[in-house]
Amino acid sequence: MSQIQKHWLGILIFGGLATIVYASESLGGLAPFPTPLDAYGDADLIKSGDVMTVLANRIEHSPFNLWASLTFLFAILHTFFAVKITGVAKKMELAHASKMKAGGKSEEEIEHNPPVGAEILHFFGEVEAIFGIWVLVLAAVTILFYDWTTFRNYIAHEVNYTEPMFVVVIMTLASTRPVMMLAKQILGIFAAIGRHSPGAWWLSILTLAPVLGSFITEPAAMTIGALLLAEQFYHLKPSSKLAYATIGLLFVNISVGGTFTHFAAPPVLMVASPWGWTFPFMALNFGWKAFIGIIISNIIYYMVFKSEFSLLSSISGSDLANRKALEQQEDSVPAWITVVHLLFMGWTVFNAHYPPLFVGGFLFFVGFAMATKVHQSHVDLKPPMLVGFFLAGLVTHGGMQAWWIAPVLGSLGDLPLMLSATILTAFNDNAAITYLSTLVPDFTISAKYAVVAGAVTGGGLTVIANAPNPAGQSILSKFFPGGVNPAKLALGAIIPTIIMGLAFMAIPQDVHDPQQDRQSTVEAS
């Protein structure tokens, strides 16, 4: 196809889309969207426990449901082919470079004239961009079934983008030089027990960073943990098995490590207010069990790869003196600057539900960072922005999945519910799973416990399972040739996932419902 033909084809496509949008604007859409769960009129079917009949009825009531979920399914499948797409793009680049070299072009000319097709494939192979790409397909499907106004109002009023914005800000703050140096000093105290060997750093990071997430939020803990693992461990080029075991363990540990508090883990945050779960409730029923699971998982993986850790120690020993000399030459950060950074993080965490406040605070931080640039590192906004884009696309798709997730969760007993929540989390953000569980009426306290336990347990199986995971992948993907492979990530995370599930469900439980306790107190008074 010639350039002129492509030009006119683009004009025709754009004109066609514009016509559809204009026509749909004139039609207008007044019906609630997505369809409210109580609008299906299937309460009797739900009580009967026949989930398939409920789903069939909802598809018949609104055929759009099926297409919205198929679009989401294709987006998920796309993530599994991202590595292959990137590989094709690199082959195209190499072929293009060879052709230009044969034509006498210089390296600089080759670098500044990449093939357009390869650049497009790189974009389609960028995991953080995939869900955003498929939002365009979702928009087309919505317009075909409804109209442009319906989709526009859904984006503008129904989807909550607070979490993606929060992750962008907290990830940027957590990756700054003062915060990273402080985290490194704290974790280094524990790594010193093992003489700062790669194995000692590995254990320290994978044990303490997840627990730290209960207080500075999981996205911040993921950023700090991934950056320190890159500096202290991954640069030594561990084997592929150990590399995937480590990133899988990091994702699982971060997912459960935020359960000491009621505000740090996204899936817990979704239920804390509706169910009345507080800091003491989370620490007594979830936090200590998560910590036991983290310790057991870390020890098992360390023992399995003990011989390789010894090999990595011998490799790192040769350049340890050089690295220490470089660290000593690095200028220290004045304590007051570190304190100010921590205050900015505290402000962001405290106002996590109020974008105007934490975004406004971030703008003040940018000014402060510029004024103290001699003590700052370069603030790279690209990784946080890509992660935010990933999460924004995910919540856009996830908001249309309530029609099938809510009845599936509501039809299960405690153990099946926990297992189902774990599996569903692998294919949908765990915060979406717990949010939808708050829509299920008459949930017992044991069912509430099971669904949250399952959601945090499965948070490490895939990149999309937990909001902080894309941040970890963005930081560590350069250590995995071709990017992080989804299947190998799941294999690396499966053992700690099973351990966490046993920790939450096998340890004897005596969970009291705060809502019922509060109601009983009111009635007694």
Image (cartoon, grey):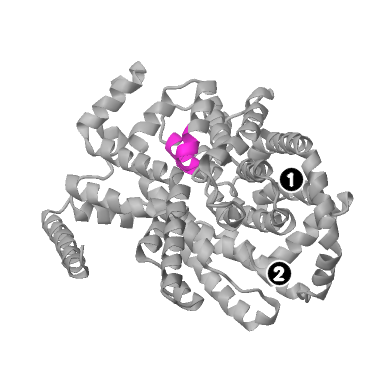
| Left or right of 53 in this view: 443 | right
Residue 413, relative to residue 294: is it above or below? above
| Left or right of 511 in this view: 152 | left
Residue 354 in sight from this viewpoint: no
| Residue in the image at 36% along x and 37% along y | 402
In the image, residue 76 lies in the stretch drawn in magenta: no
| Left or right of 155 in this view: 411 | right
| Residue in the image at 83% along x and 72% along y | 328
| Residue in the image at 45% along x and 66% along y | 98
Q: Earlier in the sequence, mark 1 or mark 2?
A: 2
Residue 353, relative to residue 329: is it above or below? above
Say which residue label 1 marks.
207
Say which residue label 2 marks.
178
Residue range highlighted in magenta? 424-437
Q: Residues within 10 Å of mark 2 (few under 14, many from 20)?
A: many
Instruction: Give the amino acid type for the residue marked by disc 2 in the picture.
Output: Pro
**Residue 506: % across, % down:** 66, 23
